[in-house]
Amino acid sequence: MERTLVLVKPDGVQRGLIGEVISRLERRGLRMVAAKFMAVSQELAETHYAIHKGKPFYDGLISYITSAPVMAMVWEGPQAVAAVRQTMGATKPVEAAPGTLRHDFALEVGRNLTHASDSVENGAKEVELWFKKSELVEWKREVDRWVFEK
Ligand code: DAT
Ligand code: MG
């Protein structure tokens, strides 16, 4: 079972799209493991986006993610990393496939609504960065056997 970090970024929160994001991930069959509504500190933003330091869009990215609250979540399921990124759509909303969140609700790369981990390894690292172990809830759903094959 994979785990992935999902953020509804400040634009998604301001636009009232937290529920839409959660609803799509729930409908997909993924299982929520943790969630918190929070302001992002400069330090957390810089650690989270360290890989983009030095890129022309870095400063804008840091000020965007720290500009207003985000909804941070952990979701799990088989191939959760790929499944969630597919549901989000491509980074640039105009390149995102119809039916994806970024296609359906966004236009600009600097206002692309969500973050989702891009690999299993980064998923584990990001979950550790954003959540304490005690905030992760281990649970099972009655419906799991109808969604998860194993
Ligand atoms: P993703 O968020 O799809 O994982 P990423 O990790 O490559 O994309 O980049 C992180 C964020 O940085 C992305 O959501 C928006 C911003 N970004 C990426 N590429 C950009 C670009 N070429 N111009 C402006 N912003 C960009
Ligand atoms: Mg990324």
Image (cartoon, grey):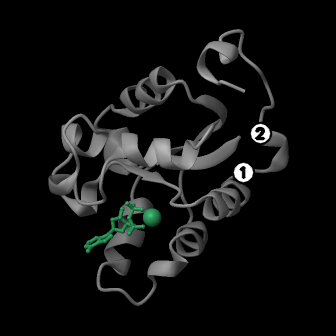
Element carrying mark 2: loop
| Residue 54 falls left or right of residue 149 | left
Residue 131 disc label: 1
Please say if 38 is above or below 91: above
Q: Is residue 77 left or right of residue 18?
A: right
Q: Residue furthest bottom?
A: 54
Residues packed near mark 1 inside 10 Å, few (<14), some (14 to 19) or many (20 plus): some
Q: Is residue 11 above or below residue 57?
A: above
Reply above or below: 95 against 17.
below
In the picture, the quarter occupied by the N terminus is: top right
Query: Residue, x 60% and y 74% (percent of image)?
Result: 47
Q: Amino acid at mark 2?
A: Leu
Q: Nearer the viewer, residue 62 or 90?
A: 90
Structural distance between the alpha carbons of marks 1 and 2: 7 Å
Task: List the residue tagged with mark 2.
Answer: 136
Label 1–label 2 contact, CB within 8 A: yes
Query: Does residue 63 appear to the left or right of 148 in the view shown?
Result: left
Tag shown at residue 12: none
Q: Is residue 8 visible?
A: no
Q: Nearer the viewer, residue 39 or 114?
A: 114
- Identify which residue is drawn at 50% across, 72% down: 49
Quick one: label 1 or label 2, which is nearer the N terminus? 1
- Give the total number of marks visible in the rendering: 2
Query: Please, what is the three-letter code of the amino acid marked with disc 1?
Result: Phe
60 left or right of 92 in image = right
Residue 145's image quarter? top right
